[in-house]
Image (cartoon, rainbow, N blue to C red):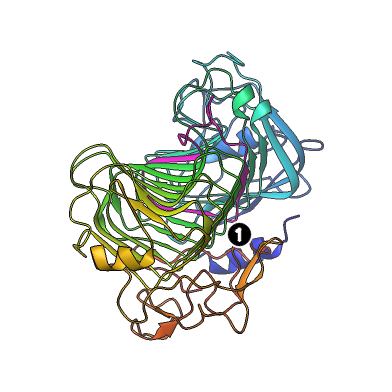
Amino acid sequence: MKKLCFLIAFTLLAVSAEAKTLYVDGVTGNDAVTYANNSQANPWRTIGRASWGSTDRSSPNSNEAAQAGDTVIVKAGTYTTTQGTGQRYNPIYNPVNSGTAGNYITFLAEGLVTLQSNTPGQGDNTIGEPIIGTLSRSYIIWDGFYIDEANVNTKRDTGPVVVWDSQNIILQNLQVKGLHHTNAYNWDDNHNCIRTEDTDYVTIRNNKLWNCYMNTTDRKGSGITTYISHNMLIENNEIYDSGSGIYLKANSNGGNIIRYNLIYDTSQDGITIGSVSQNQTKIYQNIIRNTVNGISFIVYNATSPANIDFVNNIIDSSSERGIYLKTRVAGGLIDIVFRNNILTNNKYNIQSDNSIGDTSDKNIMDFEHNNYYGPTTGHSFIGGSYNLSSWKSTFSQDSAAPVSITSDPQYINEPAGNFRLQPSSPARNAGIDVLDLDNDGNSTDFVNIGAYITGNEQIGIRPLQPLVVPMPPGKVRAE
């Protein structure tokens, strides 16, 4: 249930004196109402009328559609459209207008708003499209909608929510149920609940994503997949029952932040890293459990993955590898930092399937201040098997003070999913706060190992909060 505080907070932040609150009601609305006359008492009937400015997607009218600074409140109900695009990158409800800095166009669900489509080629692997997102737009917010992909006509190599060639987009409070791989038509390529491509400054937060597959259990079916997407903020999502949780796949300049996500019960990876390079990507304070691999680094070329900090995360109960280094070509894996993580109950804590170069070189990989605990403390690496002691002596990893440990981290209640630390936990103050996650301006002080530094962090979906417009590009809002 959405709160009107979202609207109030956004209205106070908007600077456009002409911004309007617009209404869509699938029961009482009338699409013949003009933009000027739209009100709570005179709503439109369809979301397309607010998005395209007309009832015909092929004949949009920008003057009659939602404008920069406007908030479109969509009343509870089921909204079905028969107007498609047939393009994997072009959402049905792509707004005809963009917002501006500080004046987002917001589509806000009030109550349970279910989106469906019945477009040409329903069930055809070659015809279909996303239903929401953006193509070549900026400053758009989609907030609070429910999508069951069984009732949306998508296709291979896409998904129901897509952001393409766009900047400053927010996807939040969505619930997206994909199609299980046994029902996924003939989707023999990437298929995701949310996909971004060629984007900058996209925020994906507080979404529940599940059943996100292609037609197999491959990692290419994921909750979130990104291509050529930079400066992203992916936070507080709950992702489960999918091929992988989050897949940063190809050709990114980095600058991404992935934090506070809860990922579990995936058939491959919790997080998959493909080609990410240049600006630092920071992955911290996530909980990943009951996967095959907690996090996988896939080396597609000689220069990436690179410049990634994997810090203060928890990986629990991976059936194969907590950290998997999967190499396809020589090189790659440059400046990968693993610090302050807790790995528990994984078959292997760290495993590589091929040679990855000099593992003693801290410029390649830097493991420090981690806690590895049962059922094995083994590392299988470049064809060898090591316990923590031989891992330290052979590769000079995990040896800096405070040295990494194999102690029980003493979670409060692991079976119930409470991974906070008990007061007597040996993981308390056993790490170095390299990312200044306690926000005290010091990156050399002691900090807890694992996802909970204060113990008050919300990992996964947060209770509804007033909508806060992101800070300008280049800034990260402190939590």
- The disc labelled 1 sits on which kind of residue? Gly
Whether residue 43 is visible, yes or no, is no
Residue 204 location (% of width, % of height): 51, 52
The residue depicted at 47 percent of the width and 83 percent of the height is 429
Q: Is residue 187 magenta?
A: no
Whether residue 291 is visible, yes or no, is yes
- In-front residue for pair 456/13: 456
**Toward which corner of the image does residue 48 lie, by quadrant?**
top right
- In-front residue for pair 23/460: 460
- In-front residue for pair 68/232: 232
Q: Which residues are magenta?
A: 194-221
Q: Secondary structure at mark 1?
A: loop
Residue 409 location (% of width, % of height): 55, 73
Q: Which residue is mark 1?
A: 460
Residue 57 location (% of width, % of height): 55, 26
Disc 1 packing (10 Å; few <14; some 14–19; many ≥20): many
The residue depicted at 72 percent of the width and 56 percent of the height is 2
Q: Is residue 131 above or below residue 384?
A: above
Seen in the image, is 324 located left or right of residue 69? left
Q: Residue furthest right?
A: 28
